[in-house]
Image: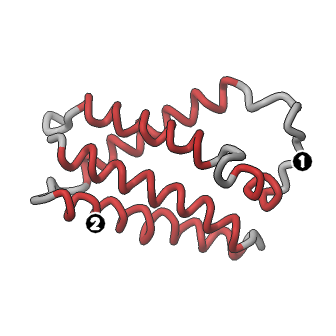
């Protein structure tokens, strides 16, 4: 644990949380995501409870700490980005793909959710990888 830069981990987790807010907003993929996920809330309906946001931030912190522990320090920004993209696409998004197939979820939903996590870990790669 001594090799972890906890400020970098915190910044990475917060960046993930902020990107998620934009990614799942109506400005980007929120409307399509709601339809594909079967979320029937209307625009004026009550938003997610604070518990959802709090737990999401805790999960982002947990994944950022795990990333910092498991991924070797990169030699360059390109390698840092590549490491993050590899984890996001080949581990997280691919694992979602397995579950989504068995749950009969749409490819569109998988692309949105997998795309978010690919971007999340690309940011982790850059922030955690370069700020060691």
Identity of the residue drawn at 21% across and 63% down: 78
Query: Which of the 4 image quadrants contains residue 64?
Result: top left
Query: Which of the 4 image quadrants contains residue 97?
Result: bottom right
Rendering coords of residue 96 (x, y %): 58, 65
User: Between residues 71 and 79, which one lies in front from this camera angle?
Assistant: 79
Q: Is 78 on the left-hand or right-hand side of 64?
A: left
Rendering coords of residue 41 (x, y %): 88, 41
Q: 92 above or below 94?
A: above
Q: 67 above or below 86?
A: above
Identity of the residue drawn at 20% across and 37% down: 4
Q: Is 21 on the left-hand or right-hand side of 32?
A: left
Q: Is 128 on the left-hand or right-hand side of 114?
A: left
Rendering coords of residue 129 (x, y %): 21, 49
Circle 2 crowding by C-alpha within 10 Å: few under 14, some 14–19, many from 20: some
Identity of the residue drawn at 85% across and 56% down: 38
Q: Which mark is residue 82?
A: 2
Q: 67 above or below 97?
A: above
Please, which residue is most extreme toward the left here? 75
Q: Earlier in the sequence, mark 2 or mark 1?
A: 1
Identity of the residue drawn at 71% across and 49% down: 30
Q: Is 81 on the left-hand or right-hand side of 62?
A: left
User: Which SS class for mark 2?
Assistant: helix
Circle 1 crowding by C-alpha within 10 Å: few under 14, some 14–19, many from 20: few
User: Which SS class for mark 1?
Assistant: loop
Q: Which residue is mark 1?
A: 40
User: Between residues 25 and 118, which one lies in front from this camera angle?
Assistant: 25
Query: Which of the 4 image quadrants contains residue 98?
Result: bottom right
Q: Which mark is residue 83?
A: none
Assign the C terminus to one quadrant of the image: top left
Assign the N terminus to one quadrant of the image: top left
Real-space CA distance between mark 2 and mark 1, rounded to the nearest whole angstrom: 37 Å
């Amino acid at each position: 644990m001594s090799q972890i830069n906890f400020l970098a981990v915190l910044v990475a987790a917060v960046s993930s949380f902020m990107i998620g807010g934009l990614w799942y907003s109506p400005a980007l993929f929120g409307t399509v995501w709601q339809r594909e996920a079967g979320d029937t809330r209307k625009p004026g309906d009550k938003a997610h409870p604070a518990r959802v946001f709090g737990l999401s931030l805790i999960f982002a912190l947990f994944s950022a700490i795990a990333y910092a522990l498991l991924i070797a320090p990169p030699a360059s920004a390109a390698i840092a980005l590549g490491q993050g993209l590899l984890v996001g696409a080949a581990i997280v998004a691919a694992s979602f793909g397995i579950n989504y197939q068995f749950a009969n979820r749409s490819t569109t939903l998988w692309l949105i959710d997998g795309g978010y996590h690919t971007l999340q870990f690309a940011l982790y790669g850059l922030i955690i990888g370069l700020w060691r």
